């Protein structure tokens, strides 16, 4: 926490509240390097890693500064809070890292349950949003990919996951399961020669438009699922035919 000091720690309504303030050290403008003048103060409250099962809140006061150089494009800027908070976040970097690690492994519901045990209250929907915000490493698109949808909220909202079909590693997550969204993604990242997909017409259309040369393959789960449903239908029809005709007809 360079440039910051802990002013006090107190217990308040079941939470430990840590008051943190700036040391007032000079801050250089990110645009031109000139030392900034104090423009005003900003108060923020951040959730931090719990201690002994107790919630920890960081109440922080930091400076907004104005660039002293006439004509600089950066008129105002905030002082950096390295290691403590990223802009517009309501959690400290430490808590964001912990939440990120849990949602990356467990996604929504399970992450929410485990985080509650760790003293971090995070509803399932927030866990999913945290997961969607995680930056994915940039890597070349593999030759064989898989696309499938999953429910963010069953029967209401769906997203698309794109995986490496060989290693089963996740490559990206798209916010919906529309053809246009997948098409834009595929056009920006050409390279896939084979795309495994479910029976969705939207995905088929997107792949056809963006990668006309790519081979489309029905993925194993969906093929077996369709065959199983067809077999059940046929068995039901057969049973109906065998059913004895009602008396009197
Ligand atoms: Zn400047």
Image (cartoon, grey):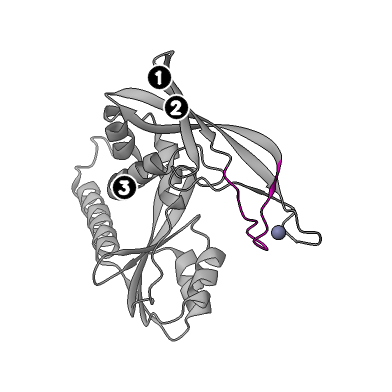
In x, y percent, where is residue 241? 23, 51
Q: Residue at x 31, y 47 (%)?
A: 101
Viewed as shown, does residue 26 lie left or right of 137?
Answer: right
Q: What is the spatial separation of the Cα atoms under label 1 and label 3, in whole angstroms?
A: 24 Å
Q: Which residues are magenta?
A: 25-38
Q: What is the spatial separation of the Cα atoms under label 1 and label 2, in whole angstroms?
A: 7 Å
- Name the element at disc 3: helix
Q: Which circle, 1 or 3, is nearer the viewer?
A: 1
| SS assignment for the magenta stretch, majority | loop
175 above or below 96? below
244 above or below 70? above
Q: Residue at x 46, y 51 (%)?
A: 133
Q: Earlier in the sequence, mark 1 or mark 3?
A: 1
What residue is pinned by disc 2? 57
Q: Nearer the viewer, residue 224 or 134?
A: 134
Location of the N terminus (image quadrant): top left
Q: Which mark is residue 15?
A: 1
Answer yes or no: do the residues labelled 1 and 2 have beta carbons within 8 Å? yes
Query: Dot 3: few (<14), some (14–19), or many (≥20) neighbours within 10 Å?
Result: some
- Name the element at disc 2: strand
In x, y percent, where is residue 15? 40, 19
Q: Residue at x 29, y 67 (%)?
A: 219
Q: Earlier in the sequence, mark 1 or mark 2?
A: 1
Query: Dot 1: few (<14), some (14–19), or many (≥20) neighbours within 10 Å?
Result: some
Tell whether circle 1 marks a residue whose Cβ is less than 8 angstroms from ligand 1.
Answer: no
- Name the element at disc 1: strand
């Amino acid at each position: 926490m360079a440039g910051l000091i802990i002013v006090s720690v107190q217990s308040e309504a079941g939470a430990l509240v840590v008051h943190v303030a700036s040391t007032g050290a000079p801050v250089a403008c990110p645009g031109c390097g000139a030392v900034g003048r104090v423009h005003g103060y900003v108060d923020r409250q951040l959730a931090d890693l719990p201690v002994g099962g107790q919630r920890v809140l960081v109440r922080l006061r930091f400076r907004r500064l104005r660039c002293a150089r006439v004509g600089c494009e950066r008129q105002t800027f905030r002082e950096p809070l390295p290691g403590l908070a990223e802009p517009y976040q309501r959690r400290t970097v430490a808590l964001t890292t912990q939440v990120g690690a849990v949602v990356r492994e467990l996604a929504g519901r399970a992450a929410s349950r485990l985080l509650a045990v760790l003293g971090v209250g995070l509803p399932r929907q927030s866990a999913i949003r945290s997961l969607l915000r995680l930056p994915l490493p940039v890597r070349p698109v593999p030759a064989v990919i898989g696309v499938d949808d999953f429910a963010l909220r069953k029967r209401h909202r769906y997203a698309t996951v794109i995986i490496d079909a060989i290693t089963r590693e996740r490559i990206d997550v798209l916010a919906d399961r529309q053809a246009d969204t997948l098409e834009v993604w595929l056009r920006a990242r050409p390279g896939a020669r084979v795309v495994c997909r479910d029976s969705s017409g939207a995905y088929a259309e997107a792949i056809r438009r963006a990668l006309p040369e790519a081979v489309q393959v029905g993925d194993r789960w969906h093929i077996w699922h369709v065959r199983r449903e067809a077999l059940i239908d046929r068995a039901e029809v057969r049973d109906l035919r065998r059913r004895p005709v009602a008396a009197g007809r």
